[in-house]
Amino acid sequence: MLKELGIRFPIIQAPMAGVSTPALAAAVSNAGGLGSLGLGASTVTQARAAIEATQALTDRPFGVNVFCHHPAQRDPELEASWIKHLSPLFAEFGVDSPAELAEIYKSFVGDTEALEMLLDTRPAVVSFHFGLPSPSQISALKNARIRTMATATNLQEAEAISEAGIDAIIAQGIEAGGHRGIFDPQAIDERLSTFVLTRLLVNNFKLPIVAAGGVMDGQGIRATLDLGATAAQLGTAFILSPESAASPGYRANLKSEKAGVTRLTPVLSGRPARGIVNRFIEHCEAVGSPLPVSYPVAYDLAKQLHAAAAKHGLEDFAAHWAGQGAPLTRELPAEELVKVLVAEAML
């Protein structure tokens, strides 16, 4: 698929919502990889602006990612319990905890306005996370000659992706930073590694397989290609690039010993996601803590607490997503990093 789009190197910059920027995506695409924008946390207006800004910076193909999660299961009693559990942390910063929470992110599933925006702006690739959109949405994108990819964490999800007519499967191993793409967060997760999952999908499907999770350098890219993957997707590797939107605190943590301690947890957003362990995670995973509320309602509370802490110069309540390979992160401009990766992988 990448060769058909004219992409020189089998390197995809992961579409990290909140971190990827038009400058980052364009730099990767201009360097011969596939840059990406994470639009799952954006409004339609914000998403259009990001796509158009990227198109102004590159004439090369790039991708965008949307979230296909189920609507939140609202439970007023559970939400009140979750707010109460975090209220002591709000009190530390002299603010009251919120009285109620909001479903801050809209799913792409059935979102006709978001679909029309993508059909109008025509990014080269649209990828799906947390599940799949409706068959009519997939057909509309394919009819517009927009290529599609979707994340799978196991064989069953990959089978659904294949049957839906998606063009490529992203094999997301347990090592990956950020949100795990599992379709049903309540289902048993075998937590397959990138190595095992990639081989399983290569052996069972004819679609191109993109390996994602723990890939940080050219040697890792070469290893995934040797496993049969068509390309490797790297996220954490690009966070320290000056083009990313990572905050100073986020960057400092990635360059410290804290990068070596990540955890897959649902407490920040309501869905399993891997990030650098901080006070928020430790507080919410302490013995006796209530269950977190549904995604993305839980994320509303986490973001409000981070905003309160940030006013006091603290980032220990922020979601600093990072994969298990975080200690291998290098601080390089995106274009230079792609060149280094190409040389290391001997592409």
Image: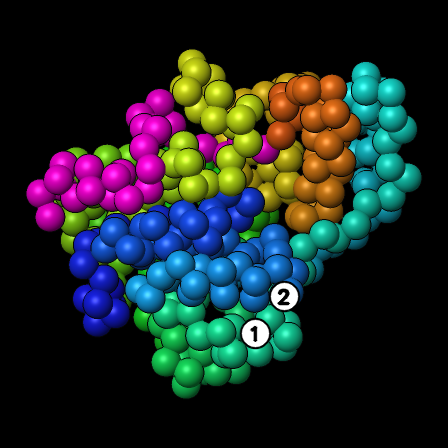
Q: Are marks 1 and 2 in contact (CB under 8 Å)?
A: yes
In this figure, what is the number of numbered marks?
2
Q: Quadrant of residue 67?
A: bottom right
- N-terminal label among 1 and 2: 2
Camera-side residue of 189 and 88: 88
Camera-side residue of 65 and 285: 65
Residue at disc 2, secondary structure: helix
Tell whether 112 sits left or right of 214: right
- Locate residue 256, reporting x and y percent: 43, 16
Q: Quadrant of residue 203?
A: bottom left
Task: Examine the rendering and report whether any part of residue 43 can be seen.
Answer: yes
The residue singled out by tag 2 in the image is: 44
Camera-side residue of 338 and 74: 338
- Locate residue 189, reporting x and y percent: 47, 44
Q: Which of the numbered marks, if any, corresponds to residue 249?
A: none
Residues shaded magenta: 319-347
Residue type indicated by callout 1: Met
Q: Residue at x 37, y 80 (%)?
A: 145
The residue singled out by tag 1 in the image is: 117
Camera-side residue of 335 and 314: 335
